[in-house]
Amino acid sequence: MKILITGFDSFGGEKMNPSYESVKKLPDKILGWEVVKIEIPTVINKSMDKIVNNIKKIKPDVVICVGQAGGRSCITPEKIAININDFAIEDNEGNKVVGEKIQQEGDDGYFSTLPVNKIVEDLRKKGIPSDISYTAGTFVCNDVFYNLMYYVKKNKLNIRCGFIHIPFVFEQVVDKKNTSAMTLEMITKGLDNVIRTVIQNETDTKSNLGTIC
Ligand code: PCA
C-alpha cells in the first residue's frame, strides 16, 4: 500500500515552508506502507498538475497534502474544501485569482475522506496540540484540496485524501509579535502520527469536536 504526501515551497516572503521541511523528514515506510514525499509549488494549477502526475505514476491508496497556516497554534486537519478562489496575495508566479469558482460544475464543497476526528484525538493523546479546521482559506491550499477531492470523485478513484495545515516553526516568528509556532520535530512527529491514524482507520469516529461561534 502507498501514501503520497505533499508539502509546499515557501511563499509570502517566508524563507522556508515547514510543510515540505517536515514532510521530507518522514520515514520512507510507516506500518509497512510506502511513503512517497513530494514538494509542490505555491502556484495555482502547477501544484495540482504535479499531484495528478504523481497520482498517475505512483497509484497511491491515500493522498495527504500539507500546507503552512501561519499563525495557527496547532496541527489542523481540514474538514472541508470550498469551491472558491479569492487570493489575498499573489502566488509564487504572480497569479491573484479573485472571487472565482475553482470548478464551474463542481459541488460547493467536498468533505475530507480522512478520519479527521480520529486524527485530532490521536495527536492529542501523544501530547501534540491539534484541532479540526473548517476552512482551508481561499488561497492555493484550498485550491489544491478542492481540486484533489474533485479529481478523485470525477475519476471515481479509490483514494482516501485530504489536507492538513501546520503552524509556523519558531524560526519564522522571531520577528513576529505574539504569533504561535511549533518545532519542526513536533510537526514531523505529528505528521508521522497522522499517517498511522489514516492507515489504521478507514472510517472516522463520531466524537464531538465541533465548535460554537
Ligand atoms: N500555505 C498556503 C499555500 C501554501 C502553503 O503552505 C495556503 O494556506 O493557502
Image (cartoon, grey):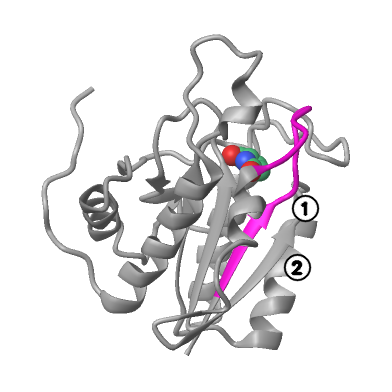
Residue 176: give x, y in percent of width and height: 61, 14
Q: Amino acid at mark 2?
A: Lys
> Pointer 1 and pointer 2: residues touching (CB < 8 Å)?
yes
Task: Give the residues in magenta.
Answer: 4-17
Q: How many marks?
A: 2
Residue 78, can we see it? yes
Query: x%, y% of residue 66?
Result: 55, 54
Front-lying residue, 67 or 151: 67
Q: Residues within 10 Å of mark 2 (few under 14, many from 20)?
A: some
Per the image, label 2 sits on a secondary structure element best described as helix
Query: In the orientation shown, which residue stands out farthest toward the top?
Result: 177
> Regarding ligand 1, which quadrant of the image does it lie in?
top right
From the image, tell me which residue sits under label 2: 50
Residue 127 relative to residue 185: left or right: left
Image height check: is 6 above or below 136?
Answer: below
In the image, residue 86 sits, relative to residue 21, either above or below, namely above
Q: Amino acid at mark 1?
A: Pro
**Residue at (64% x, 79% y) in the render:** 55
Mark yes or no: residue 101 visible: no
Residue that badge 1 annotates: 41
Q: Residue at x 44, y 85 (%)?
A: 158
> Mark 1: which secondary structure?
loop
